[in-house]
Each structure stands twice: as C-alpha cells, then as structure tokens.
Image (cartoon, helix red, strand yellow):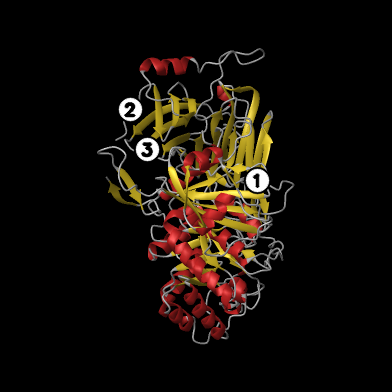
Amino acid sequence: MPTTPARIISLRAAGTCFAVELTEPVPRVLHWGADLGELTDADFAALSLTAEPAILNNSVDVPRHFTVWPTEADGWSGTPAHHGHLAGTAAAPRLTTTGTTYRQESDGSGEIQVELTDASSDLDITLTYTLDPSGVLSVTSGITRRTEGDPAPYDLAQVLTLLPLPRRATEILDFTGKWSRERSPQRRTIAHGVHSREVRRGKPGLDSPYLLAVGVPGFGFGAGEVWGVHVGWSGDQRYLVEQLPEGAGTHASVLGGGELLRAGEIRLAPGQTYRTPACHFAWSAEGLDGLADRFHTLMRGRPNHPSAPRPLVLNSWEAVYFDHDLDRLLRLADRAAEVGVERFVLDDGWFSGRRADNAGLGDWTVDPGVWPDGLGPLVDHVRALGMDFGLWVEPEMVNRDSDLAREHPDWVLGPAAGVGPSARNQHALDVANPEVFTYLLKSLDRLVDTYGIAFLKWDHNRELHEAVHGTDDRPAAHAQVDALYRLLDALKERHPGLEIESCASGGGRIDLGILARTDRVWASDCNDPVERQSIQRWTAQLLPPELIGAHFGPSPSHTTARNSSDAFRLTTALFGHPGIEQDITLCLPEELARLTAWTALYRELRPLLHGGRTVRADLEDEARLLHGVVAHDGSAALYCWARLTTSPEGQSGRVRLPGLAADTRYQVRVRTDLGLPSFHQTSSPAWLTEAVQGWIELPGAVLAVAGVPMPTLNPGQALLIEVRREECPAGSPEQGSRRACSDGMGRITKVCP
C-alpha cells in the first residue's frame, strides 16, 4: 500500500536506482543509473549534500536544482517540462508539491507519485514513476484543469519527461531510415544546445528515432555505460538530449521525450485531463545488449505478451500480389502445410474493387467477383490442413475510388477546404469521428466473427498531413491515435484470442504504445537478407525476437532486385518471428527440402530463440556480423556468423562469442540443416572443420575470452553455430556435488549427482 515517504526516496531494481529528494517547492532528482545499494540516513544526507552545485558568475543567486518538473522557476534555462497559456496569460508556471506517495515491492518493482499544482493556471499535475523488475523506469503524467477558476481553456503546448545524465555520457545514438531500410543507426557527440528529433508523420515513421541512447565514448553492444529513452506513443513524438554550459543542477545534460503536440490540439477546459504517453527510460553498464535485455525483459513480463509458441507464417503478398485466384491459393496452402507452415495469411486484394492499390480501401466486404462463395472455401481448406487463418486489413485508410468515400466524403480526414494530395493513392479516415469508429469496429468484428480469423495484418500505408477535422479545422493527430487505441482495445475485447500485427509500409509504426495492443510488428517490407540483417539487428534493440516479423522471400528481392542464396535468406529469417513470403509452389524439390528442414529447425530452436537473451558482437568491420541468442541459464546458444560484403582483411582473427561464461565448458557444432555457406578460402579453421562433423568440446575461456578464428565467407552468406553447456560427467569430481543439466533450450531436465 502507498505510504508517506521519507525526505529522500529511491526505487531500486535489477541493478538500477532512481532517487528523488522531496525538496520544496518541487522535488529534485538526485540520481538515475547504477544501483547505490542500501543507503543509511547518513548516506542519504551525503547524497543530498553533494547534490548542491556551485553558484556560478552571472547566474541566479541560489544553487540550481534539476527538479522532477523543470521550469524557469527553478533557474532552468533549457527545455521546460511543460508550457502553455491561459488565453495569453498564466505563461510562467510556478509549481508546488501537494502530496507524494511511494511504494517499493520485494520483486524490485516500485512507484513514486508526485502531486503538483500551479495556482496561476489552475493546473494539477500527477507525475508517476514506475520501476519494473527489469530495471526499466516508465514515467507518465496527468495534467488536469481544476473545475474552479477561469473558464477559458488552457492551451497546452508541450509536456515532456526529462531525466538527468552525468558528464561522462557524451555520445548519442539514435535512428533514421526510409522505406525498406528502417532503423539505420546514427551517432554523434553531445554539444551545447539541443539535439531534438521531432516526428510529424502521424505515426513514428520509417525514420523513427525509435530509442534515443546516450553513453560513454565508444559504447558498444557489450561494453560501456548507456542511458536510453523510448516514447511509447504511436503518433507525433519528440525526443531530445540537451546540454547547457551551466549543466542541470549537479548533472551535465538531460534526456527526455514525449508526444509532440500541434498548436491548439490540447485545450483543457475546467475538469479536463491530458495524459501523456509513457516514456520508458533504461540504464545499462553492459552496453546496448544490456539495455536491450532490460526492454526484452519488460516486454516478456507483460500479461498480454504472447505465451503460446509463435506459429510459422506464410503470407501471400509476394506469392500472388493482387492475383487472388482460389485454385492458385489452395495449391499454395497445400504446399505451405507440406513444408510445415502453421499460419496462412491472405494479404491485400480480397475486398470489393481491389484489383490494384488505387481502389477499394474502406469497403471491407469480400469481393463477390473474385470470391463468389466468400472466403469460406479458402479458410476451410486452410484449417483442414492444420493451419490457422489470417487476413490483411488497412482500416484507417480509404481510396477515393470506393463506395465508402463516395457515400461519406466527410469521413475523410483533412481541411474543410478540401483534402490535399493522396499518398499511395489513399487518404486517412477520421477515426476519431464516432460514426467512422463504429463503422470500422462493426466491419472488422463481422470479418473476424464470420471467418474465425486468428490474425490480422493491420497496415497503415501513408503519413498524416494536414491532420485536422471539422468545419473549423481542429487538429486531430492526437485524437486519431487515441481512437486507434480504442478501436484495437474494443476488437481485442470482443475477440480475446485474436492476434494483430502492426504494419505501416513495413516498420513505420513500431512503439510500445501500439505493442500494448498488438502481438508482433512487421519490421520492414524489405525481405532482402543483406538489408534485413541490419534491420532486425537494430529492431531488437527494443523488441525481443518473437515480436519481430521476419520472412523468407524470393530471389531476386522484391524491394532491391538483389539475388541471394535461399540458405542466407532462411538463416536471416530464423532470428525473429519467421515466415514465408514467396510462391513456394514454384520451388524446386531441393528448395522445398531446405524449406522443410528450416521449419523443423525453427520448431526445434523456438524456445531458445524466443526465450533467450539477444547478444551482438562488437566487430571492427561492418562487413561481418555475429549475433545470437543465449539461454538465460547459460545452457544453450545459437549464433549467426554472416558476411554482407567483402572487406580488406582475409582473416577474421579470434572472435569472441558474446554471452558465454569463461568458467564453463561447452560443446559446439555447426548446424548444417540448410547446407553449408559458400566460403572464400581454401579450408576452414581446424575447430570449425571438426564442428561441422558433430559436437566438439571447447572451454568458455576460449570461446568467450580468447575467441576463435572464424571462416571467411563469401558475401551474402551465413553460418549457424550451436553451443550447449557440456553434458554431465559420468561421476562427480567431489563427493556430494550436484550439477543441473538441461535439454539445450534452457529447461532443466535433471540434477546429476
């Protein structure tokens, strides 16, 4: 139960700590980062004493504190936690604390809630810090206009969550991208001023900042302190890092984010509340892999996280595109079942008038000309083969050439003077309009109910420009996302077993807000394995592999025209939630044999791939990649050694396998289920030649510390290396000693004497 806290309170979990001092008028942040341990009253007093900075020349005449809600009233000249005005007045908020509650649970979770008020604007603010057992700190705020006072609306222009960073955090990593090349990393050094990333696309976008990280110089996957933030919101966003010459109290800079609000979008009348999306903050002393591990643990601990084995998918898009011929699709389903597919998804082209991408969106009824008997014959056939059935939809969009747009032109989102140019031949619907909301919910509910749909691929193929509605052109970007969330929640409530994928021209809407309501994301429309190696590598910075759609596509690639081996495509798709996106009725027998072996390999390794810890090696040459998944108990691991291009060096040198223990003995083998890759060498390193034949024993000191020489692959090739903890010896070295043995997937099977 919440209790009244002491003067200094802290949340601690998984080696992290967040400490706040309940100073007046607003509490200040003392520490965020490494766990400080169990502190005595004297220790807390020392932490408070050392939180007092110097008073500088030409400065305010009191020490600057960095508070939980920084404004100019604190002497803070940087970006404020919020700003707005009351009909042109009340533009200088001066907050005071009205209450604080605090709890810390034995599992490491905890919460601090601070109540603030601003008399000049009649605003009450509730600021909530929630620490998950993973060590991720999630922060939300509620800003409420009191019912008494000035009846004019308060125009809220910005609300951000800001946390301090130490002087040693000097290097920024965030992401950019474009269609078919999402989540491309970019680095820079912190300088004075603001590094700000603003998203104005109505969704996070293909160039989403995704996760803004700041660390010590040269931080990598396996080493270096790093602090990060993710904005869990599926609309316009703002991320920032800011450093002022005078610092932020005793801290050097600040890290934060929140929803980007359009002018006039949030106008709080008396009694109304604006609630911010959650900003998720995490710290790691073990580089980006440590940061990813915290977010993966957070996601896997959610009540709605997929608990059943993730079914292997076949999606029809790159197999048939708009050519929806029943006989062809029945043959595709037959072949899918033969190779081991568990879910068959019918993509775009099934609904009224949809023979290309310029018509039909909004008319969510089955096209009788293409499907005279409805989807039933295909659905029944798919289920009879032992697969479940999924369907593509794009509910938030409409084509001008549709019955819906002709009957309800006022349902199209846009200015009263007329909508602007189409994008991908489509416009957005005003989902916040109650009539539109009701129409979409009824249409989707009917489809799911009629065909017993298990999975919806929910697409969103254009950005929102001029997102206003009504005769007075009220801004609607926030309302659009809010309506989307309510629509997804309502559909899930009616169909509890329904799974939904967030797709947006590929990976254009990936955030923890949408994932609170969906079950996986489509990482990219690009199935080219060279591009996918990087896309999946960085998508996994936030999401565990079981949430990342990763499909095997045809060669040449639909998006890049690059040719690649099927083994490389299959290996790449293994490290996610795998699927097939190809007309496999055209495959040769040897290709089908590899596909079948791949589906069997996935089912064998699925518990490890979707339950282990993601690891990535720091290599000096970006032409080569080493990544994998290690069981949390250390009993098993699977690595992918991949080459994207040629490089000047002929030899890799000794390469360490991340995530293994130096004091443990392991067995290692090369998985040849998909065949061996093409090598750029006369012969492989000796250890690898033996590992191709079967298990060999190697100590952790060699694998994890000294490293092993890797083979030189040709470009566009990958090798699968499996590792397991050495099996139990016949007898124990010491009387009475006991040792846990596993099945290689992290499950303990017995305890050997």
Marks 2 and 3, the one that precedes in the sequence: 2
Q: Is residue 214 left or right of residue 715?
A: left
> Within 10 angstroms of label 2, few (less than 14), some, or many (20 or more) residues?
few
Q: Give whichever of 387, 148 is nearer the camera.
A: 387
Q: Residue furthest right?
A: 648
Q: Give the alpha-carbon distance from disc 1 to disc 2, as whole Å.
A: 59 Å
Q: Say what secondary structure mark 2 lies in.
A: loop
Mark nearest the camera among 1 and 2 is 1
**In the current view of this chain or complex, which residue is farthest to the left?**
736
The residue to which callout 2 is attached is 4
Q: Quadrant of the C terminus?
A: top left
The residue under label 3 is which amino acid type? Answer: Ser
Numbered disc total: 3
Tag 1 secondary structure: loop
Q: Which numbered tag is attached to residue 652?
A: 1
Is residue 452 or residue 272 the one in the foreground?
A: 452
**Crowd class of label 3 (few under 14; some 14 to 19; many from 20; radius 10 Å):** many
* Residue 225, visible in the rendered structure: yes
Q: Residue at x 51, y 82 (%)?
A: 330
Which quadrant is home to the N terminus? Answer: top left
Q: Which mark is residue 506?
A: none
Is residue 503 visible to the viewer in this orientation of the structure?
Answer: no
Residue marked by disc 3? 109
* Position of residue 294 measured from the top left corner of the image (x, y, whole percent): 47, 42
Residue 367: percent from left, percent from top = 55, 81
Residues tagged 2 and 3 counted as in contact (Cβ below 8 A): no
The amino acid marked with disc number 2 is: Thr
Judge left or right: residue 349 versus residue 386: right
Task: Give how far apart the Cα atoms at labels 2 and 3 are.
Answer: 17 Å
Give the quadrant of residue 559: bottom right
Q: Position of residue 40 (x, y in %)?
A: 36, 18
Of labels 1 and 2, earlier in sequence is: 2
